[in-house]
Amino acid sequence: MKILYLINFAGKGGTEKYVRDLVSAYHGKLAECYFAYNIGGPLVDFMNEKGVKSVQISMRSPYDISAAKKIASFCRENAIDIIHTQFPRENYIAVLSKLFYRKVKLFNTSHLIMNQGAVWKIINKLFSRHDEKVFSVCNFGKETLIRNGVSESKIEVVFNGIPIVEPYRSDKVKREFGISDDTFVVSALTRYTSEKGLHFLVDTVSKLRDITDKKFVFLVAGDGEMFDEIKKKIEDLGLSDVIIQLGYRNDASDILACSDLFVNLSSTEALSFAILEALGQGVPVVATDVGGTRDIINPDSRCGSLVEYGDTQGGAKEILRYIEDANLCSSCSRAALENVRKNFDIKIMLDTVYDRYEKSLKTEDTKDE
């Protein structure tokens, strides 16, 4: 089986992690993987390291016929069986490529939870007919796809997953920043972009400090365009002693290993890898009730709490519950591990996606007979 993964921007976000996971699992084992992209980034370096044949193709719009022809030519030259796209732009171009090379099967994973307008709904209805499957990473995403014109029969919810590892505790990061053993550590792994709710996070910490004398610190790992803006806000509010901006880090597991609580206060979210990684280390989570987060944190999973986006007082009070209640943290920690192992093991996602690839090709074989 030959699979072409097609993406516009080869960056380092959750979508790119999803593609990395698929390629790591399949390439050289179950399939031969290929990669096509428009704008370069870290994902290209990953593909090169894995020995995946890659090609850069300009994709100026969702209806770029020139890009569609080049993709069709690449697929013909390399006998590609499947194209798997991640966003509407690439998906539409992949559909158009079938005008020039019809043999490929198309799959799309939707990582978006954004409502689109009437014109997009019509286009989605027409183009999604040519996809074998449209995977949604959460139930809210499925509902959004249906509202956006995609046929429900085409959609399948397949949750993001993470590798199941043995959780551990470490004070390495605490020692690095001189954090005392009696300080409650809250962590966040994020990007400094508007939808990640960094202003809400800082305002919530400010409220938290007003309502407790308990010792706490927030470790915020990540980078992005708003880093300096948030840094100034932290300084202006006099919170530099309780919010430590770590910048970009490649030791997320060590950060989680010293954390008592994890927060994700985004204004929009599909299914957060960061939340799953925290739960996989047995760290309870307080998150905003947006998008697919309720698929992870809910009354049945008992691994954390949901708060309303923008409610700084409510967010502060919820975080304080964990600071003041060690038993709550312990029970949520145990439930977190159970939830991830049962519902978000990466093997579930990898096996399901590959099974759908296989079935699509078997269907074609049956037709040929």
Image (cartoon, rainbow, N blue to C red):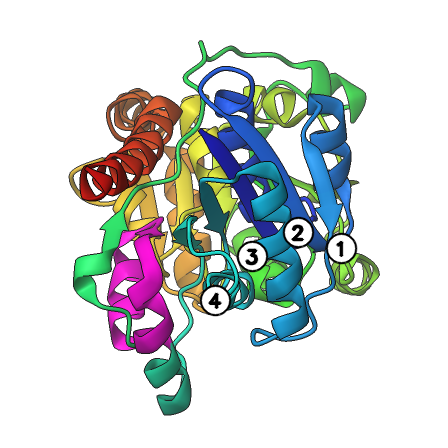
**SS for callout 4:** loop
Labels 1, 3: front one: 1
Query: In which quadrant will I find the C terminus?
Result: top left
Q: Which residue is mark 3?
A: 210
Q: Earlier in the sequence, mark 1 or mark 3?
A: 3
- Mark 1: which amino acid? Gly
Front in this rendered view, residue 217 or 65: 65
Q: At 76% across and 29% down in the image, what residue appears?
A: 48
Front in this rendered view, residue 192 or 204: 192
Front in this rendered view, residue 241 or 21: 21
What secondary structure is the magenta-colored segment mainly? helix
Q: As drawn, is 172 to the left or to the right of 365?
A: right
Residue at the far front in the pictured view: 369
Please indicate, yes or no, whether residue 338 appears anywhere in the rendered image. yes
Label 2: how many Cα within 10 Å (few below 14, some 14–19, many 20+):
many
Question: Disc 2 to disc 1, how far (Cα)?
Answer: 6 Å
Question: Disc 2 to disc 4, how far (Cα)?
Answer: 38 Å
In the depicted structure, whether residue 15 falls above or below residue 196: above
